[in-house]
Image (cartoon, grey):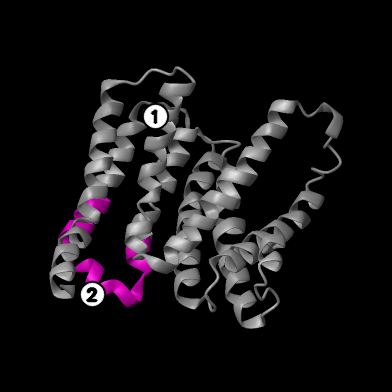
Amino acid sequence: MSWCIFHGEKIFDPKAMKPAIISGLLLLFIGNGIVIWVEQFLPSGMVAIMVSSSPLWFVLLDKPKWNENLSNKSTILGLLIGFGGVGLLFSEQISKAISSMSSTRDMFATGILVIGSMAWAGGSLYSKYKSSGNSATVNTTWQMLAAGIAFIPGSLLTGEFRDLHMKTIPIDAWLSVLYLIIFGSIVGYSAYVWLLKVQPATKVSTYAYVNPVVAVLLGIFFAKESISQMQIIGLVVILASVLLINLNQYKKAPKQARAGA
């Protein structure tokens, strides 16, 4: 918000604030909030595969683009293959997770993750079609601010502030939070909101397939983690799926260039 004010952008515009606040609550409060909650109980592999279903919801919920998306075989095939690739990437973790899931709470958490994926896709599409004005930065500001405020009552009711002791938080945790603020929120999330505005929603939704690839590669290069043959196959399948989803755009580019010439 300080950046927007510094650059003279109009912040307090009700027409711009309302859709940004609604999409922020869907994306960050409900979508991300559910992931944060279920991560306490479910293995990360299970959460990752459920979150990766969001591109499928993009297609199903994007009513204005039904004719275009549902008739595009490469897009549909790419989405399905990509979801399968994520399954291969986390196959070992998923098999362990399924065998360890027994409580009603775990089953409920898995089911509610579907709602989280739907909320993320729905909030993304709402932001794309309903946001007014030209500034993605202003939209991002109100989205994150609305979600942040929405989380406060829950924190108070669960007594999280009472159990928070600032002096006991290690420096690594503060650095992690700083990293998420800069690269996760200001850079990453702002780029996501901007991309929703300028690119097709199905194309932007492939982030859900690419994120696990980036996570695995970072683990290999920086945390010295090992990678199995099945994970390598999953990486290749995911990258192939992203190529398929964007195949139609690649075909259009030369035609548009020739038409322009």
Q: Position of residue 153 (x, y in %)?
A: 78, 57
The residue at which mark 2 appears reads as: 67
Which class describes the residues within 10 Å of circle 2: few (<14), some (14-19), or many (20+)?
few
Side (left or right) of 235 relative to 1: left
Side (left or right) of 184 relative to 225: right
Q: Nearer the viewer, residue 150 or 102?
A: 150
Q: Main secondary structure of the magenta part?
A: helix
Q: Secondary structure at mark 2?
A: helix
**Relative to 19, is 244 above or below?**
above
**Relative to 126, is 32 above or below?**
above
Which class describes the residues within 10 Å of circle 1: few (<14), some (14-19), or many (20+)?
some
The residue most toward the bottom is 15
Q: Secondary structure at mark 1?
A: helix
Q: Nearer the viewer, residue 116 or 3?
A: 3
**Relative to 216, is 68 above or below?**
below
Q: Position of residue 73 (x, y in %)?
A: 16, 60
Q: Which numbered disc covers residue 217?
A: 1
Is the N terminus in the top left, top right, bottom left or bottom right quadrant?
bottom right
Kind of residue sitting beneath label 2: Asn
Kind of residue sitting beneath label 1: Leu
The residue that appears at 34% across and 65% down in the rendered structure is: 200
The residue that appears at 56% across and 63% down in the rendered structure is: 26
Is the C terminus in the top left, top right, bottom left or bottom right quadrant?
bottom left
